[in-house]
Image (cartoon, grey):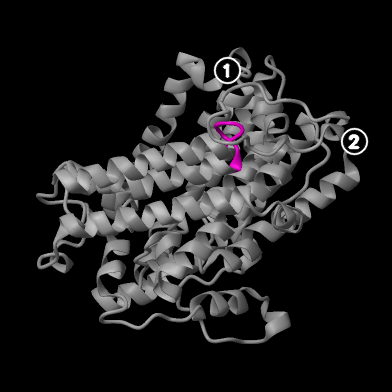
């Protein structure tokens, strides 16, 4: 497996080059995009190259040459990374219009206001969840209806309530004065409560995002972040705490999956239980097998299946329109759901990352176009959300948009997720701008464009733009 290992190393070097030439702060939107890609498209193939695991599900890869597939997969990953760099660096004229996808919060709410909003949204989330418990027979019945029967109908707007409550709770926690123990405890309790409420809906994302928001947020607003200001990656404690974030996030994701399986079946599901290796159990339980799906696409398209010509992105955009505007529509079948039906004859998803969505629609040309579009979106996020280092609420907005709406790039489902998550965040941002006092530092403007490779040093204090 030497050649696959060299392919993974080569793609990792390209990742580092892109990181150094596009990232301004180790937790800005571009950095979040690249971390996600590293987790899905570098760490996973590394386990194959080192012989620690094999692609999942095993029966679909029994007659496929894993080594050559990994080499092909990493070539496509490199293409995506280079296109991502091009979109972030070579399309400055399009950055301004693209920032409209993100909330532009120009004012900061006070700690008490943030806490009041957190408590109010948590009460709404609790009321909605209790009504669902009553309809489906308690938390266990709701989990079964959501994950087994897939029979839970909740209005799109209500699904965003626990997430919004969590974001405001994190902001309230970091904004509260150091001695305000009651405020901090209340905010943290609301964050935990919303994670649990969302988990009973069959979703783990709110709980996992909460862990990331709190741990990574402490690197911005906590004592460690203040001490390392301007020298983030050169501060040993800061670096180690940053590396701890994905580890604890994976632990929480695995624990919640195990708890859900125990509620549904009294034991772990066969895919993560039995004689599975630890690496396989963690990968499957934490949804780190998207690269495996990508390998299937690269092996079967276009020889055995036809490219879809962009239909998934068109249908996904149309499906994102509210029913009051577009009327009743046929349910949108995402590429992940189509793959699950094609290969596994099941109704849940089988995602292949944003790279897979573009490849299955337009081939390698789609990978290049999708990568460039994703780089443009990430760069627009850097500009629109540049206040994340001063405002904990903007930090929460940045995190949720880059890991839920645009994780690793633009997916065929990103339009629908943007309507469900992005639009409410934009509305909240506009309301804050109307009622709160404008931040004096807003006049400093967005961060300057990333410097060319070789001159850029991540972690250095950014140069203030000329006034």
Residue identified by numbered label 2 = 437
Q: Which comes before the other along the chain, label 1 or label 2?
A: 1
Task: Residue 231: give its label.
Answer: 1
Secondary structure state at the residue bearing disc 1? loop
In this rendering, the label closer to the viewer, 1 or 2: 1
Q: Is residue 173 left or right of residue 357?
A: right
Figure check: 10 above or below 223: below
Residue toward you, 183 or 402: 402
Position of the C terminus, as image quadrant, is: top right
Q: Is residue 464 left or right of residue 370?
A: right
Q: Residue at x 45, y 61 (%)?
A: 354
Which quadrant would residue 299 be assigned to in this image? Answer: bottom left
Q: Residue at x 75, y 57 (%)?
A: 100
Residue toward you, 213 or 4: 4
Q: Number of labelled discs?
A: 2
Q: Is residue 379 left or right of residue 387?
A: left
Secondary structure state at the residue bearing disc 2? loop
Disc 2 crowd, CA 10 A, few/some/many (<14, 14-19, 20+): few
Magenta part of the chain = 23-29
Which quadrant would residue 46 be assigned to in this image? Answer: top left
Q: Position of residue 151 (x, y in %)?
A: 44, 74
């Amino acid at each position: 497996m030497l050649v696959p290992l060299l392919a993974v190393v080569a793609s990792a070097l390209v990742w580092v080059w892109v990181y150094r030439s596009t990232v301004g702060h180790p937790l800005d939107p571009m950095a979040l995009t690249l971390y996600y890609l590293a987790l899905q498209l570098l760490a996973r193939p590394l386990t194959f190259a080192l012989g620690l695991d094999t692609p999942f599900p095993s029966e679909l890869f029994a007659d496929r040459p894993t080594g050559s597939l990994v080499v092909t997969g990493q070539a496509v990953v490199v293409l995506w990374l280079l296109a991502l760099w091009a979109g972030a660096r070579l399309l400055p004229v399009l950055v301004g219009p693209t920032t409209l996808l993100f909330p532009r919060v120009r004012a900061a709410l006070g700690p008490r206001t943030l806490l009041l909003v957190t408590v109010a949204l948590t009460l709404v989330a609790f009321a909605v969840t209790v009504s669902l418990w009553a309809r489906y027979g308690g938390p266990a019945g709701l989990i079964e209806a959501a994950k087994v029967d897939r029979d839970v109908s909740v209005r799109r707007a209500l699904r965003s309530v626990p997430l919004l409550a969590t974001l405001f709770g994190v902001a309230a926690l970091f904004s509260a004065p150091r001695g305000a123990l009651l405020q901090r405890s209340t905010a943290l309790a609301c964050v935990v409560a919303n994670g649990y409420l969302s988990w009973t809906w069959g979703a783990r994302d709110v709980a996992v995002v909460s862990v990331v928001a709190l741990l990574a947020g402490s690197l911005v607003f906590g004592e460690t972040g203040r001490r390392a200001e301007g020298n983030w990656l050169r501060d040993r404690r800061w670096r180690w705490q940053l590396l701890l974030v994905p580890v604890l996030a994976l632990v929480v994701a695995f624990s919640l999956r195990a708890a859900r399986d125990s509620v549904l079946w009294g034991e772990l599901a066969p895919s993560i239980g039995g004689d599975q290796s630890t690496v396989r159990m963690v990968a499957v339980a934490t949804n780190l097998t998207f690269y495996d799906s990508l390998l299937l696409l690269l092996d079967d398209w276009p020889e055995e299946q036809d490219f879809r010509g962009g239909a998934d992105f068109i249908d996904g955009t149309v499906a994102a329109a509210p029913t009051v505007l577009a009327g009743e529509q046929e349910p949108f079948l995402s590429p992940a759901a189509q793959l699950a039906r094609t290969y596994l004859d099941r109704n849940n998803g089988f995602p292949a990352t944003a790279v897979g969505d573009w490849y299955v629609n337009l081939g390698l040309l789609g990978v290049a176009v999708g990568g460039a579009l994703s780089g443009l979106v990430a760069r627009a996020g850097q500009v629109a959300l540049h206040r994340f280092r001063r405002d904990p609420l903007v930090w929460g907005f940045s995190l949720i948009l880059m890991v839920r709406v645009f994780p690793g790039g633009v997916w065929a489902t990103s339009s629908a997720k943007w309507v469900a998550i992005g639009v409410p965040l934009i509305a909240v941002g506009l309301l804050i701008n109307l009622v709160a006092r404008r931040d004096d530092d807003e006049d400093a403007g967005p961060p300057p464009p990333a410097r060319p490779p070789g001159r850029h040093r991540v972690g250095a204090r950014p140069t203030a733009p000329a006034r």
